[in-house]
Image (spheres, grey):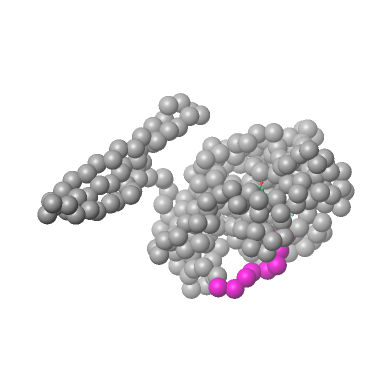
Amino acid sequence: MALEGWMRRFNMSLTGLRIGMAESLADSNGLSIVTPFFGMADTIALGAVVSVAACRGPIIPYSAGRVDATVPGPATVPEPQQPLASHIESFRQHGFNQTEMIALVACGHTFGGVRQADFPLIVTDNTIDVDTFDTTPAFDNTIVSQYLQSTTQNVLVVGPNVTTQSDLWIFSSDENVTMQNLLSPDTFATTCTDLIQRMVNTVPNGVNLTDPIAEPFDYVVSEPFFSYQDSALFMTTSLQVPIYLSQSHEMGLKITTGTHS
Ligand code: HEM
C-alpha cells in the first residue's frame, strides 16, 4: 500500500478504472517528467511530499532511490465497500497497525474527496464533481474535528450509501480514541509526518533510500543552456528564489544570468 492515496491517481489511470481520476490526470503534467536520474516511483513520492507542503501541511523528509516496478501491482487499492477486517489486514501486511491505519486514513483524507464520476453510488448528486472529505482545502485536522463534532460532510462517513462508509468504520474502530488524539493540531502534524514518511518509504528488501532531505532547498538552479558563437562558448542558466509575501502568498523570483569564455 505504499503511496496508497496518491497512487490511486496513477493506478486508476493506468488500468482505466476510474474515469474521474483519469480526467484529472490528463490535466496534470505529472507523468511527463522524464529524467535518467529520477524514476517514476521517486517522482510520485516527491509529489506526495510536495502536495502536503503545498497545502500548508508539515514538511515530510524526502528520500530518493526507489526502483520502478516493471510489472503491475495489485489490481486495486482498498475499496470503500470492503469490510473493516480486510482493511486492517491489508494495512497490517504493509507494516501499519490498527491505530496507525486510522491515523493514516485521516491524514490522507484531509484533502481531496470522492469523485462523482468514479463513485456515482456514493456521490449521488451529479452536479458535484468532487465531494470533498472536509470543508478546508488545507492539510489540517478539520477532517478529525468535523468527524468528532458530527458536522462532517465526508461521504465515506455520512454518505447515503451505508455499505461504503469505510471512513466511519475505520475512524470508530477503536471507539474514537485515535481520532480524539488527533484533535491536537501538533499531534496531527507529527503523526502524519511520521506515517506518510513511512508510507512513501516502504520499499522492497534490497532497495536503499538516500538520507532524508529534511528541508526544501531555498533556491533552484535550472535551465542550463550552452551556445557557441563567434569563437565564444556562452552559458546561461536561471536561479529561482521563493519570495514570501505573506503567510498565504508565495511567488518565485527568477533571475537569468549568462557568461562566456
Ligand atoms: C481503507 C483505506 C482507504 C479507503 C477505502 C479509501 C477510499 C477512498 C476513496 C473511495 C476515494 C475517492 C477516489 C475517487 O473518487 O476516485 C479516496 C480518495 C483519496 N484518498 Fe483514500 N482511502 C483509503 C486510504 C487512504 C490513505 C491511506 C490515503 C493516504 C495516506 C488516502 C488518500 C486519499 C486521497 C488524497 C484522496 C483524494 C484524491 C483526490 O481527490 O484526487 N486514502 N479514498
Q: Does residue 174 lie above or below 75 as drawn?
A: above
Pick whichever, 54 or 96, lies toward us.
54
Q: Does residue 233 lie above or below 190 as drawn?
A: below
Report the predominant secondary structure element of the magenta stretch.
Answer: loop
Pick whichever, 74 or 193, lies toward us.
74
Q: Quadrant of residue 151?
A: top right
Q: Is residue 133 shown to the viewer in this render?
A: no
Q: Is residue 113 shown to the viewer in this render?
A: yes
Q: Is residue 62 magenta?
A: no
Q: Residue at x 51, y 62 (%)?
A: 40
The percent position of residue 77, horizontal first and vertical second, equals: 70, 61
Viewport quadrant of the N terminus: bottom right
Q: Quadrant of residue 217?
A: top left
The percent position of residue 22, horizontal first and vertical second, equals: 66, 54
The single residue placed furthest to the top in the displayed view is 246
Q: Is residue 179 left or right of residue 35?
A: right
Magenta region: which residues?
70-78
The percent position of residue 34, horizontal first and vertical second, equals: 45, 60
Q: Residue at x 52, y 51 (%)?
A: 29
Tally of numbered tags: 0
Q: Residue at x 64, y 46 (%)?
A: 107
Q: Does residue 64 lie above or below 127 as drawn?
A: below
The percent position of residue 147, horizontal first and vertical second, equals: 75, 38
Q: Residue at x 48, y 29 (%)?
A: 249
